[in-house]
Image (tube, rainbow, N blue to C red):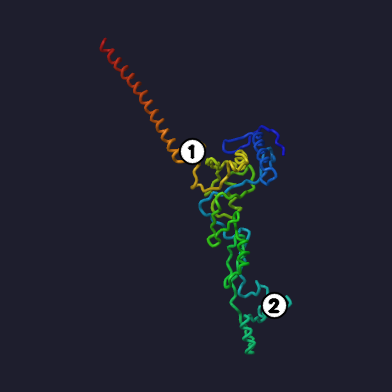
Amino acid sequence: MDYGSCEYLVPCGKDKYISKNELLLHLKTYNIYYEGQNLQLRHREEEGELIVEGLLNISWGLRRPIRLQMQDDNQRIRPPPSSSSWHSGCNLGAHGLVLKPSTLPDIQVTDVDATMNAEGTGSSTGAVRLQPEEPPQLLRTRSDVGVRRRGSARTPSEQRRIRRHRFSINGHFYNHKTSVFTPAYGSVTNVRINSTMTTPQVLKLLLNKFKIENSAEEFALYIVHTSGEKQKLRATDYPLIARILQGPCEQVSKVFLMEKDQVEEVTYDVAQYIKFEMPVLRSFIQKLEEEEDREVKKLMRKYSILRLMIEQRLEEISEGPARL
């Protein structure tokens, strides 16, 4: 990759810019860290605009269940066959010829016991005895929430096969009866994005990837540091550029998907005190209160002196005309 220098500015948020040269230096460090892995990023220029693209790791930080789609968008429900048709409207004879509805062959469907009893009694009336038809089945989707076959219990092998086809995120299966799911906190997924995509666009892409019905307005992306600092990415920010500028090491900071109403931002100044034990924090508060008291007394002395000076001056002014 060419990391040559160029001095025009690249937007990284609302009223925030970074020079192309500085961004490319960060990108070079990022790709060296992920050398030989699929997390390396590529860059190109289109009409003079620098575009970086690649995979972005996002950790799940949800506290509430999410709703998954009951049916995939590209799957359609198979319509049930009509009562006047045979085999979805195609009436086939013994040699594959299409028969008219009036010439349907007589079909006798019996179970094994019924057949044996019929042979024993020798009664062959030629009547058509049909078993109750099974209800039409929905096409199986990736989320395996189609209508279940009734009337027969599944074998263990069938149950294992169904579990393999159920929708999962990072190997965790969701409840297919309620269609809700809570990803394991801290588990990682990724999406392929570019540096021109804003935070809402990345959120929608992630939700569409896993067929999540919840609105993107319910969530937000946060950069969470090991120190406890939490920085919310604004709607005008570009998550991929933010990740590059934060550095590649996820032991220092990660991008989390979280609920907007469940998380509060934590500034760097506050994060410095999060790791301390409560006794240490209480001692800090006590020292701050003592310092506050000293400052208050100092200010009170200062303004008391000023007040005395002003009162003394007022007395001198009032005595002046009386002497004259």
Q: Position of residue 36 (x, y in %)?
A: 70, 45
Determine whether the residue tagged by mark 2 lies in a helix, strand or loop.
loop
Q: How many marks?
A: 2
- Rendered image: mark on residue 99: 2
Quarter of the C terminus within the rendering: top left
Residue 49, can we see it? Answer: no
Q: Is residue 18 above or below residue 83?
A: above
Q: Quadrant of residue 245?
A: top right
**Image location (x, y in percent) of residue 57:** 61, 46
Confirm whether residue 194 shows in the render.
Answer: yes
Q: Is residue 27 left or right of residue 64?
A: right
Image location (x, y in percent) of residue 23: 64, 36
SS type, badge 1: loop
Kind of residue at disc 1: Tyr
Q: Position of residue 160 (x, y in %)?
A: 62, 64
User: Measured along the vertical axis of the image, is residue 293 above or below residue 164?
Assistant: above
Q: State the residue in front, 154 or 1.
A: 154
Residue reaching furthest top?
324
